[in-house]
Structure formats: C-alpha cells, structure tokens
Image (cartoon, rainbow, N blue to C red):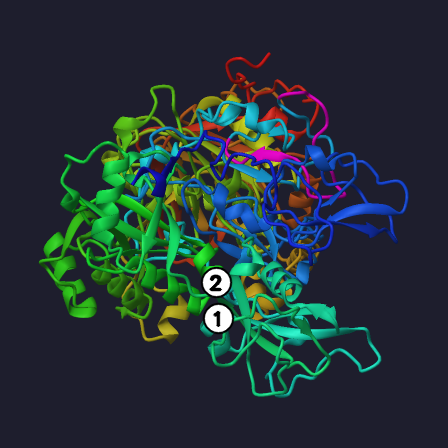
C-alpha cells in the first residue's frame, strides 16, 4: 500500500506551494522548444518584440528584439531572468489556495490596473474588481480566476485561529519597497510584486516566501476586526449578501461564462475567421458537455498543418488547464470531413500511437475537449480534518474505490488505523471564482466514476475541484437576520405575530432574539438555512403599513476572542454623500479593514452595525457623510446605548457632505469644529484611518427640541386636518434656526423636490441658493413681533430681526463664525461641552451674506441652558439643515441626556512616510529563522 500513496505537506518540495524543478515534466518530440524555469505552469517561447516591453520579473525594460513570453498567462521575461522566475502561472494559481473563498465582483473603477489572470492592462468598460480583495480581472478572464479571496470570517470550513498573510500579485505603487531586501518591487507598467492584503507589506515574488506566514495586521492592527473573531453561518447566501454589498446593475459573470468576445453568437451563424489563403485556421473549442449546452466556446488559432498534440495543448492553454496533452483528446462537435489519421473522433475511437496524426485543411471548425478514459487515477485528498492548510494525501483510486475505502486508506497512511472511519467524511469542494460549492459524498460512492462525470461536464471544473477529508460532526445552524421597517413601539409578541402574518415564519425554526422598538426592528435567530433564505427573499417584496421592510444578515462577533489591545473601528458610510466619493471610500475601507466592520447606511441604517458590535467591550465609530449622517448615527446610538457593552463609543467624522444639502445650512460644520475639514478632498483612506486612530476624545452637548403645535397651519387645513399635530421631539447637534435662514432652506428644498435631477453638482446648488436668497432680499418679516423668547426662565427682549438662531457649535453655514470672536463679559466663551446654547439674531439676507464673508457677526442676544420660544404665527424652522413650517405654539430646547464622545483630529501632522503607502501600513515583520 505504501507504494500506491504518498503524504504531501505544505512545506515539502512536492507541495503545490513549493517550486518544483520544472514547469513541465513531459517533453515530446513534436513540441516546440520549452524553457526550463523554477515556477510551475509557465510555457515560455521566444518572441520578437515590436513595441516597448517590460520584464514581469525584474520590471526593467527589455532591450533588443527578443523576449520570452508564457503562452498561457502572457508573463514576459528577459532570458537572464527565466531561471529566477518564481511567479506561478495563472493556470496553477488554484494550487496555492489555502482556504477556498469566492470573490465579490463589481465593475472596475477609474484607476489603471492589470488583469491578474492574463496580466494585460484593463479597460474600464470590460473589467471587474473584487469588493473584498485587490483582485482585478477582465470580464472574460473572471471565470478563470480562482477562489482566493480574503477569509474574513469563520464559516465552519477550514477555520484557523492564526491569520496568515494573504498575498496578491501586482497593481502596486511604483514606489513600493520590498520588506525583505528594501528595494523597489512595484511597477506601473506590468503586473509585478506581492502585497499582503491584511497588513499591506510588499515584497518581490522571490522574497515574500522568506517572511513568516503569520500576519500581525500592521499599523492598523488595533482597528481591524480579526477574522478569527467573526462567525457567519449562511451557506445559502452569496458573499455579496453576507457583506451587505449592494447588488450591481451589471450581471455577475458565471463561473463557466468564458465565451470569447470576438466570437460570440450562435455557432451556426458564426463564420470562420481564417481565409483560404491564410496559413492558419481558427478552431472553436468547447470545454465539455456544459459548454456545449450553453453554446460557450473559446477560439484558438493554429497552422493548417499541425500535429494533434499541439492542437490539444493549445486547447488546454486557452482554458488555463496545466495538464499534459497526451491525457486529452478533441472530439468533433459537428459532422464534417474527418481525417483518418486525426486523434479526434466522433465515436470514441482511440488514437493509434504509431500514426503521425496531423490536422489538415478540411477539419471541422468546432471541437469538444475531452479527457481520455482511465482505469485508475491519482487523487489528492486534502486533510482539512487535520487543519494542515494545503497538506494533502495522494491516493491511487480504481473503478472499485469507494469513499469508505479511501477514508480507511487515508487513516492507514496517517498511522491512525485504530480510529473509526465513521467519524470522517469526504467533501467535494468546487472552487468557483464567485461561489464555493461543497457537497458531502456518500460512503458507497465510486470516486473514479465521480471524477469522470465531472470531467465530462468540464475539465476546467475538475481542475478547480478538491476533495477534503473532514470530521463528521453535526454543526449548529444559526443564521441571524435583522428585519427593519416594521411599525415602532410594539412588543415582542406583537412583532412575532406580525411576521407570522406577512412572512409566515415557522416558530419551531425561528425565534426573536432582540427587539428594537423605537427603530421598528427585530433580530431573528433561524436554525434552518432554507428558511433563512426564504424569509430574506420574501422580506424584499413585503410592505407593512405602507412601508417596505428589509432584512440584513448579521455576523456574530466572538468578543471573548478579541485581543486585549484591540479597539476595532465600526465604520458607517453614506454612499450618497459627496457624489461618488462615498462609494469610493466604501470600497477602499472594505479593502483596508475587515468588511464585516464596514456598513453602508443605505442598508437599514446604523442599527445593523451597532447591533453587530453590541458585545464588543471597546470600539470607536467613524462616520463618512455629512452632518445629517452624523446626526442620524448619534440618534440611533442614543436610543440603543443601554444595550451596548461599550455604551459611549467615541465618534470620528470623514466630512463627505452631499450635493443635496444646503451650502449655508449643512456645510459639514461639525466636522470643521472637530478639525476634520470642510470636506473630503481625496485624502488617502489609510491616512484617514491613521488620523482617526490618533484623534483625541472630546465631549459635545446634544439638545432635545420639543415642538408643541397649538394650531393647524393652512396647508393642513386644505388637506382636511382640523386638529393640531401632537407634540414631537427632534434632536439637535449643530444649530436650530427660525425665520429667514430656515425660509431659504425651505425654498431650496422645494426647488429640489420639483426637479431633483438638476441638483447633482455643488455649483448648481449654490446658484439655486443665491437665486432663492435674492428673491427674499427685499422682504421684511419683523420676526421679533411674532416670537416670545425665554432663556433660563428669564424673558429676553428681541431686537428687530428676521432670523433667530440657536448655536451648539462655533460654526454655522459652512464655517461662518456667527457668534463672533469679540470678548464680552456678559457671556461665557462658547464651547462644545459648556452646556450652553448661544442665541443669535440676523437682520436679513444681506446680513447673512456679510457673516458668510467674514465682514460681520450676528447679533448676540442671550446664552443659556434652557430655551422656550412662543410662536404666534406659522414660521419656517430648520434643525441641522432639515426645514419645515412650524404652526403657532411653543418650542422648548433642553439638554438631551449625557454628553456624547466625539473625536477631534490631532493638530500634530503625520510624518511623511517614505516609500509606498503599503510599506507605511505595517510594522516590520521578522524574517524566518535562519535567514539573515
């Protein structure tokens, strides 16, 4: 038995991750000259260069007319560099996968990138990028990328407590430096260099293997949520849903969607691209039965007279299959003239080994790639049960080999014959680029027959399939769904009955674990994957009380496993803020951090993120958006802080603002006061996180505004409303305005509602605001005649004004100092946490413009901790940029509970880092023992 099987470990010379001595072992007399290299899979040939070309190994310019090109992955090299090449060919990339994790593809951005499969430069219109890792590919190349995305959580399959470096080749800055030799390893001309997608260190392809495998997360280690501390059990859901990534309008590529763009269309209607005078012919190659059913093929161009083995080899290369051609054959797709000496056949006839078979001019245009039948095969069984990463055991299987017999043989080779084979099972894992599929095999299933069936469907699929031996244990199924958009202030029983009525939830499979009554949301614990999928899909089409409900998958943070020094950042991004900047930042932060700590606010708001972090003992919040977005997060945090282990997390801001907010009523004023700036100007996201990490905590007051209407406004009377609205409460963070400034806000708001499509630029918004202001410039309101003001129980006489503004922060209308800097013995110096409001008046639009220009300040009226305003007629009111008409009645402003913890950017400027951004992201890692 020992001569029939071998055990291969990840550090052995025979491991897929090691570098064997030759790229191809088999040489045939008919093959062209092949150059021996140290990296597997490449098939180099000497080519004549017709344009400036760079070496993919050393990144230097190739002088002269000759270079060496891999016919599979387009790797270009100097002749002198061939013997030093360590980069694995794209056809062998799947052998380096430690834990199969699928990608989340979306359309590519605007930056210059190179395809990780064919190594050519990408064009925006035909390229994809992964939302979780740094993989960039052509649309046509995406099915040939392997499932090597970052492992961001545990899902019950090949889970490890130690996080290893996750290396990705190329697309580095030209100034990136190697962590080992400190020389430049990046290039803007070719796909070159390696980078860890967790800690960001960069290295040469020949140097990175020296580094220790364990990753320490670099300079962001305190902010990153470790992947071994997150658990998600949602096998029926795609990764896009698990990471709450918005579905792209572009259809995701199928794992077998590899139609050559140049020859798409119906096969019968497609004409051959070769002409009779040409020395070459174009053949259409189908990869097995599945490609034939889908009518999906790729094309190869071969000489009109060529040996069969060379054609088979070209067909294998076009599908990135690294196997030897003598094990495969081409079968004709349709009935046309056949050459007797051909290896190809319609009836399964085998090749005559003595014949010198060649393709001739009358061969069919379409062929199906097939594997030759075998009586026995060598199968690699990966020891997922032993947690050995890529370690596998080589077993020789025959027609009689069953799953049960293979398990027994594996135990015998491991010296564990005494163990019960019933406690183990074999799992078939298909490592597709967009989905990893797992299937448990039955004990009596014939493995050789299984392999042959897979190859009949697709040879490429067989090369992306692994067999793992794992423990046969019953895993606990628990899917957590947060369902929001429900009516507020209901009991747990009422929510359960409501969901039974509209979603038909099954009580024996579904239970309510958390209730957020003020948010109208519940968290469901579901013990069945199919039931969780049904509820999720049904919620997307369910409306309750005229409101669309939604469901979000919630990851579980194993807080007891968090390192003691870890203080992860909970990051909220409003993708609608700042034009496209919000979405770009969302993409960047997912790459720098764990995607499970980055939440898009358009998906059920801040609640999913706060619920996910409810048991984390220490964390901070970073909000990317305008002042309205910050107020939204603060409001939800205030309502559920009693359910959080960290009840007072500090909050930082990335001031995106939004093109839909007013310039003078919501201009990122809170961010200005906290030194985060007037707006996001494209600062590097890594630098943003470092500034966030170094920021200092400050306290800030929040205020509650009680609006008690005593009459009905004319607009409501026209709609048949005869009773005044009940009292309502809103919260204020920045300022509240009555009169002219609120009227301008309301005019802008109405203009935007009438033609929302035109409000897509800051310049247009400012123009509309100026236009609204000019229309009001000559109006006299005499606002003071319709208001009565009390501050700290004292009546305050109002001067002749058109606008009354209450300030919580020393910034108003995009950075203007409305209170002024002049000292006055009657008032305290304004502060964020002084517990006081500043009451200021403005006389009109001209006065507001002068304040904006820094020529004047407002009229100081009062300062206090409790304000009561009596309104005798309907007037415009705005709170933090949100305007409306307030009926006659009373407005009471008072402190809203405890002060909130905010983060103020440090005045100390970060030292400029030399080298690449990725080098600055990490502390130096220790080299392996024995390496000096």
- Relative placement, left or right, of 315 versus 534 is right
Q: Distance between the residues labelled 2 and 1?
A: 7 Å
Task: Point out residue 160 in the picture as x, y percentages from the top left corner.
Answer: 34, 33
Residue 825 falls within the magenta-colored stretch: no
Q: Do the residues labelled 2 and 1 touch (CB within 8 Å)?
A: yes
Locate residue 539, reporting x and y percent. Answer: 29, 65
Residue 859 in view (yes/no): no
Q: Which mark is residue 288?
A: 1
Relative to 578, residue 262 above or below: below
Q: Sequence order check: which comes first, mark 2 or mark 1?
A: 1
Q: Which region shows up in magenta?
A: 180-198
Quadrant where the image shows the N terminus: top left
Q: Which residue appears farthest toward the right when viewing the image?
A: 64
Q: Quadrant location of residue 154?
A: top left
Q: Residue at x 17, y 55 (%)?
A: 490
Density class for disc 2 (Cα within 10 Å; few <14, some 14-19, many ≥20) is many
Query: Viewed as shown, does residue 886 lie left or right of 106?
Result: left
Percent x, y for residue 326?
55, 60
SS at circle 2: helix
Q: Residue at x 62, y 24 (%)?
A: 920
The crowd level at tag 1 (other Cα within 10 Å; few <14, some 14-19, many 20+) is many
Percent position (x, y) of residue 571? 45, 39
Question: Is 775 or 188 nearer to us in this picture?
Answer: 188
Secondary structure mostly taken by the magenta-highlighted segment of the chain: loop
Q: Residue 459 carries which label?
A: 2
């Amino acid at each position: 038995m020992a001569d029939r099987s071998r055990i291969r470990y990840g550090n052995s010379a025979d491991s897929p991750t090691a570098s064997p001595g030759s790229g191809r072992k088999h040489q045939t007399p008919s093959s062209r000259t092949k150059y021996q290299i140290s990296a597997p899979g490449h098939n180099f040939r000497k080519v004549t260069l017709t344009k400036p070309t760079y070496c993919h190994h050393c990144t230097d310019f190739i002088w002269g007319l000759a270079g060496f090109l891999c016919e599979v992955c387009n790797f270009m090299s100097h002749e002198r560099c061939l013997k030093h090449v360590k980069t694995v060919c794209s056809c062998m990339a799947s052998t380096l996968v430690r834990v199969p994790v699928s990608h989340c593809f979306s359309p590519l951005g605007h930056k210059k990138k190179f395809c990780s499969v064919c190594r050519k430069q990408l064009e925006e219109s035909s390229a994809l990028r992964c939302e979780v890792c740094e993989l960039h590919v052509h649309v046509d190349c995406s099915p040939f990328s392997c499932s090597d995305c970052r492992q961001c959580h545990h899902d019950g399959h090949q889970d490890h407590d130690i996080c290893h470096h996750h290396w990705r080749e190329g697309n580095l800055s030209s100034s990136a430096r190697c962590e080992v030799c400190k020389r430049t390893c990046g290039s803007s001309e070719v796909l070159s260099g390696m980078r860890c997608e967790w800690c960001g260190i960069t290295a040469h392809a020949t140097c990175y293997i020296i580094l220790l495998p364990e990753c320490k997360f670099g300079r962001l280690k305190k902010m990153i949520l470790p992947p071994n501390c997150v658990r998600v059990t949602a096998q029926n859901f795609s990764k896009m849903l698990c990471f709450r990534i918005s579905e792209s309008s572009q259809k995701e590529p199928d794992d077998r969607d590899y139609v050559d763009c140049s020859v798409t269309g119906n096969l019968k209607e497609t004409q051959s691209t070769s002409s009779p005078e040409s020395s070459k012919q174009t053949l259409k190659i189908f990869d097995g039965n599945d490609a034939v059913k889908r009518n999906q093929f790729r094309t190869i161009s071969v000489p009109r007279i060529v040996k069969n083995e060379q054609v088979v080899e070209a067909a294998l290369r076009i599908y990135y299959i690294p196997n030897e051609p003598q094990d495969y054959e081409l079968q004709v797709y349709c009935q046309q003239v056949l050459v007797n000496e051909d290896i190809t056949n319609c009836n399964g006839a085998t090749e005559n080994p003595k014949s010198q078979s060649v393709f001739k001019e009358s061969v069919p245009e379409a062929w199906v790639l097939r594997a030759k039948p075998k009586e026995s095969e060598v199968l690699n069984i990966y020891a997922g049960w032993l947690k050995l990463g890529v370690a596998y055991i080589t077993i020789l299987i025959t027609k009689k080999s069953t799953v049960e017999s293979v398990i027994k043989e594996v135990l015998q080779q491991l010296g564990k014959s005494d163990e019960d084979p019933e406690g183990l099972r074999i799992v078939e894992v298909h490592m597709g680029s967009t989905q990893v599929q797992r299937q448990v095999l039955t004990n009596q299933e014939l493995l050789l027959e299984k392999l042959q069936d897979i190859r009949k469907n697709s040879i490429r699929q067989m090369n992306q399939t692994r067999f793992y031996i794992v423990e046969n244990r019953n895993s606990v199924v628990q899917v957590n769904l947060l369902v929001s958009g429900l009516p507020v202030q209901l009991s747990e029983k009422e929510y359960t009955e409501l969901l039974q009525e509209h979603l038909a939830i099954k009580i024996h499979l579904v239970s309510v674990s958390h209730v957020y009554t003020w948010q109208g949301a519940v968290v469901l614990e579901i013990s069945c994957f199919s039931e969780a999928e049904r509820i999720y899909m049904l919620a997307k089409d369910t409306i309750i009380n005229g409101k669309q409900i939604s469901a979000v998958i919630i990851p579980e943070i194993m807080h007891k496993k968090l390192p003691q020094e870890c203080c992860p950042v909970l990051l909220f991004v409003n993708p609608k803020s700042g034009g496209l900047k919000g979405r770009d930042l969302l993409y960047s932060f997912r790459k720098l951090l764990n995607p499970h700590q980055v939440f898009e606010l358009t998906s059920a708001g801040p609640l999913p993120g706060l619920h996910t972090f409810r048991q984390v003992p220490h964390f901070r919040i970073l909000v990317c958006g305008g002042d309205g977005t910050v107020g939204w997060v603060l409001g939800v945090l205030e309502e559920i802080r009693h359910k959080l282990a960290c009840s007072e997390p500090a909050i930082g801001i990335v001031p995106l603002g939004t093109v839909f907010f007013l310039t003078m009523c919501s201009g990122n004023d809170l961010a200005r006061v906290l030194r985060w700036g007037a707006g996001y100007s494209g600062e590097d996201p890594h630098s943003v996180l470092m500034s966030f990490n170094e920021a200092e905590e400050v306290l800030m007051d929040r205020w509650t505004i009680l609006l008690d209407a005593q009459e009905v406004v004319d607009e409501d009377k026209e709609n048949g409303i005869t009773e005044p609205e009940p009292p309502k409460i809103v919260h204020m963070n920045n300022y509240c305005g009555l009169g002219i400034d609120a009227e301008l806000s309301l005019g802008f708001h109405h203009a935007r509602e009438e033609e929302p499509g035109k409000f897509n630029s800051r310049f247009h918004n400012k123009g509309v605001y100026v236009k609204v202001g000019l229309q009001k410039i000559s109006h006299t309101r005499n606002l003071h005649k319709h208001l009565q003001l009390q501050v700290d129980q004292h009546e305050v006489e109002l001067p002749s004004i058109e606008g009354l503004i209450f300030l919580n922060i020393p910034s108003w209308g995009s950075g203007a100092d409305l209170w002024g800097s002049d000292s006055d013995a009657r008032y305290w110096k304004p502060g964020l946490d002084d517990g006081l409001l500043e009451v200021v008046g403005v006389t009109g639009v001209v006065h507001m413009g002068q304040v904006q220009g820094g020529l004047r300040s407002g009229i100081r009226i009062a300062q206090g901790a409790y304000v009561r305003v009596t309104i005798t007629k309907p007037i415009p009111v705005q709170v933090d940029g949100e305007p409306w008409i307030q009926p006659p009645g009373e407005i009471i402003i008072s402190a809203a509970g405890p002060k909130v913890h905010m983060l103020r950017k440090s005045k100390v400027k970060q030292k400029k880092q030399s080298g690449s951004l990725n080098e600055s992201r990490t502390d130096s890692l220790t080299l392996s023992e024995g390496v000096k």
